[in-house]
Image (cartoon, grey):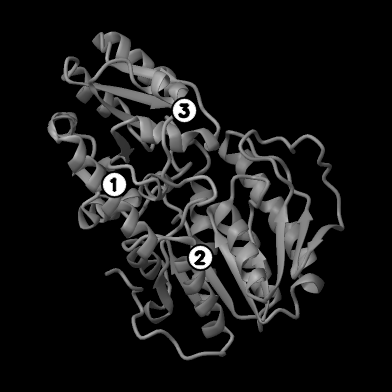
Amino acid sequence: MKIGILSYHFPPEPAFIPGSLAEELAARGHEVRVLTGFPDYPGGHVYPGWRQRWHHETHSERLTVRRVPRLSGGASTSARMASYLSFAGSATLTARRYLDDVDALYVFQLPATTFAAAGVLRLLGRVPTVLHVQDVWSRDGADEAGHARWVTRMGSAMTRIYRAAARIAVAAPSMRDLVVAAGADPARVRLVLNWTDERIFHPATPGRAARQLVRRDGRCVVMHAGTIGARQGLETAVRAAAALDQTMDLLLVGSGAEERRVRGLAAELGAQNVRFVERRSPVDMPELYAAADYQLIMLRDLPELRGTVPGKLQAALSCAAPVVASAGGDTAELVERARAGLSCAPEDWAALADRFWLAATIPPPTRTEMGRRGRQTYLREMSLPTGVDRIERLLHEAAGRVTESADPRGNLA
């Protein structure tokens, strides 16, 4: 097949889902054409050595990447929307010739891609599309003065592309209900769980440097790796750890908009067992995972997050790391079903403190078995080959090459 891919982000940005999908589809013999922007994530500035311009293409065997200019995004809603709309304009102008003859189009659907997807789908009306939904637009920015209109515009654009798509893949089970409520045809929706960057995240043995960074005595170490932001609600974890200052250590690796607040709470509570480590390279993380006893998955108790599975869960499971999940919805259900760790309700520090205490009492061989079960679940349900198999089939279905799957909800054993 000739397959088009539309994605706001693409490698060398940390966008391994569309990047690895493009490489794998090309390796399977398809001709793949990617339409994306110039790399600027997460800093909002184009990477050194890159210059935004028209007609920028790179070619490898069966894979072509076309990049189009866009405004750099900022922290405000207006700046983000300006970036989204500029990408939409550039992508729509380019798509007429670049993607007009593809057999099917795959859209990596983040909010940033929505307006571009709406424009491209309207332009290429005869090209069947597979939409891979990563996030459902909700109230992001709605509380900022004067920006509620963006919520309405984004929601309307999403509804249009849900209705236009031949197939929709959702990245979490409960997300199916959200996209159906937003206008998608239930018969067209399938579950395709995200995979992780398997070149990096796999079981590892910690070296001396990793052990020295993570461990300072024989106590249980629970590590949170990634963004310290509003969605994570890490104040709950700090309060829980502070109640167990003689039992376990909480190690927060990363940074984010809420880091100052979380550090301040740890200092206010005198939580000597809460430690902070600056953001590390992804290639360092498997050893750090292996040096800790558990990985912590935190999500606040928000309706839109109950249908979200954060990427750090796939990374932890792929590394055979047992987890403690303070989350609701799909994240907690996946952890419990895989028997890969412990879970509790979100934003309940007393319940999380109980999970921390139980985690510390579980013997190391049982923790290892939790990690092994988690990795087996990852390989069976979330791995790169499994995910690409499902996306490839959806592309064939959209193009009318095969009959549709027997199980419209996906396969969750």
| The C terminus: image quadrant | bottom left
Mark 1 or 2, nearer chain start: 2
Q: Is residue 6 above or below residue 390?
A: above
Question: Which of the numbered marks, if any, corresponds to residue 318?
Answer: none
Left or right: where 247 falls relative to 198: left
Q: Residue 28: where, in percent of width, then height?
A: 62, 74
| The N terminus: image quadrant | bottom right
Measured in 3D between alpha carbons, the distance from the residue under mark 2 to the one under mark 3, in whole angstroms, is 28 Å
Mark 2 or 3, nearer chain start: 2
Residue 311 showing in the rendered view: yes
The residue wearing badge 1 is 371
Residue 231 occupies quadrant = top left
Residue nearest the observer in this picture, 132 or 62: 62
> In this rendering, which labeled residue sits more in front, label 2 or label 3?
3
User: What residue lies at 46% left-to-right and 44% top-to-bottom?
Assistant: 140
Mark 3 or 1, nearer chain start: 3
Q: Mark 1: which secondary structure?
A: helix
Residue 265 occupies quadrant = top left
| Dot 3 amino acid type | Gly
Q: Is residue 213 above or below residue 233?
A: above
The residue wearing badge 2 is 132
User: What residue lies at 21% left-to-right and 52% top-to-bottom?
Assistant: 339
Q: How many marks?
A: 3
| Dot 1 amino acid type | Gly
| Dot 2 amino acid type | His
> In this rendering, which labeled residue sits more in front, label 1 or label 2?
1
User: What residue lies at 66% left-to-right and 36% top-to-bottom?
Assistant: 44
The residue wearing badge 3 is 254
Q: Residue 196: where, in percent of width, then height?
A: 48, 52
